[in-house]
Amino acid sequence: MSNSLAIAAVTTTLRNLIARGIGDELGSGSVTTRPPDKARENGESSNQINIFLYHTLPNAALRNQDIPSRVKPGETGKLPLALNLYYLITAYGQDNDDILGHRLLGAAMRVLHDAAILKPEDIKAALPESNLHQQIERIRITPVSLSLDDVSKLWTTFQTQYRISAAYEVSVILIDSSLPVKTPLPVLTRGSEDKGVTAQADLIPPFPTLETLQLPNRQLSVRLGEEISVKGHNLNSDDGRVLVLLKNKNLDISVELELQQQSSATEINIQIPNQPADFPAGFYTVAVKLRREGKEQTTNALPFSLAPKIEPNTPNNQTVTIICTPQVWQDQEVTLLLGSRQLLPTEQQTQNPGKTNTISFNVETIPAGEYFVRLRVDGVDSLLINNSVKPPVFDSSQKVRLS
């Protein structure tokens, strides 16, 4: 496979081929690789062919295809950079003689027509350290038809006088990635006791899977000491031991709970520990770890929210104090929803480090009246609605009166 010198190797090979061709045709002349606006800037008056690489594009056919010699079955590696190169061939006759220029262009086009596929030995002779001659794909030269509009725009870009030219596409150039190929060890056995793939006639997952999570009393969140139910498939353990994994990523909490009694292979009931100092309100995930078929397996995780339980104290003229269970940690965001208003804790409250279950809010600017209150901790609100009755009602204990 070639390296980063591949583009230079193609340009050098084209220059060598054309130089040899016009030497046989006219006996003299030079081949340069300059931008069109600088091709004759040194005052050349001899026969000259200029080769200019004016455009590069990814090769659509090979940009997403592995190369067999680099990546074998089971291996993964970065795909090579596959490029198409576009060249502009311009002829200049001696003393700017157009007839000689046309003759030079014809000679150059004949060379490229005869060398429609670049030979590896020509590429190696031009720039052997590029390793381009070793690539599997052959490099083909194809004429490109440019419209008058394309030609006009191209030469206008260089702000120089137009000279008779021909455009060619050279493809495909493969530049190898410098990243190493990942080569795993070969497979010796296919599963336990080399049994191979297990097939089944339904869509039920063959491994432990959680599908749904149900909260008590149709609540939006669960509270400490309450029970949640997870349902899924293959939730029975070979040794009867089932671990529940509770995680809160925001506060970096990860707890394992061992169930004393498993419900069934399709349902597990989990009681949230009533530990106010260890389980702050917020968003959690629950997963189940168990042993099946001789190895430990862990299910997918389902999210749920743990709501704070609050006791509003009788407010004075300036503050409302909320007693919260579980405790609020220092890094948690806390707001009080008082009716339709949202209040932040007092400045004195925000300066207290560590954990607390008592939070104060300034209400001196709030008009007198009765208000339902909710405490929002890390985006989870305390439960205000009682869904255990129909129709649901507001919990009257979650109310304060401002005088």
Image (spheres, rainbow, N blue to C red):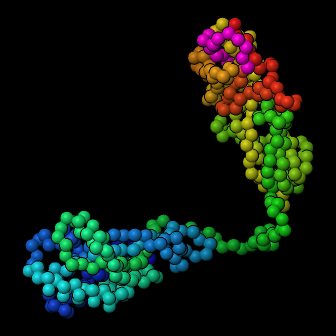
* Residue shown at the point (73%, 11%) measured from the top left: 401
> Can you say which quadrant of the picture contains the N terminus?
bottom left
Q: Residue at x 27, y 86 (%)?
A: 109
Q: Pick whichever, 335 or 395, lies toward us.
A: 395
The residue positioned 72% from the left and 21% from the top of the image is 373
Residue 271: image quadrant is top right
Q: Is residue 388 magenta?
A: no
Instruction: Tell me if residue 369 is in the magenta stretch.
Output: yes
Compared to 97, does 184 lie above or below? above
What is the x, y in percent for residue 218? 83, 36
How many numbered callouts? 0
Residue that lies at the very extreme toward the front in this rendered image: 148
Magenta span of residues: 357-372
Describe residue 241's horizontal placement relative to residue 167 as left or right: right
Percent x, y for residue 144? 34, 79
Which quadrant of the structure image shows residue 365? top right
Q: Nearer the viewer, residue 393 or 377?
A: 393
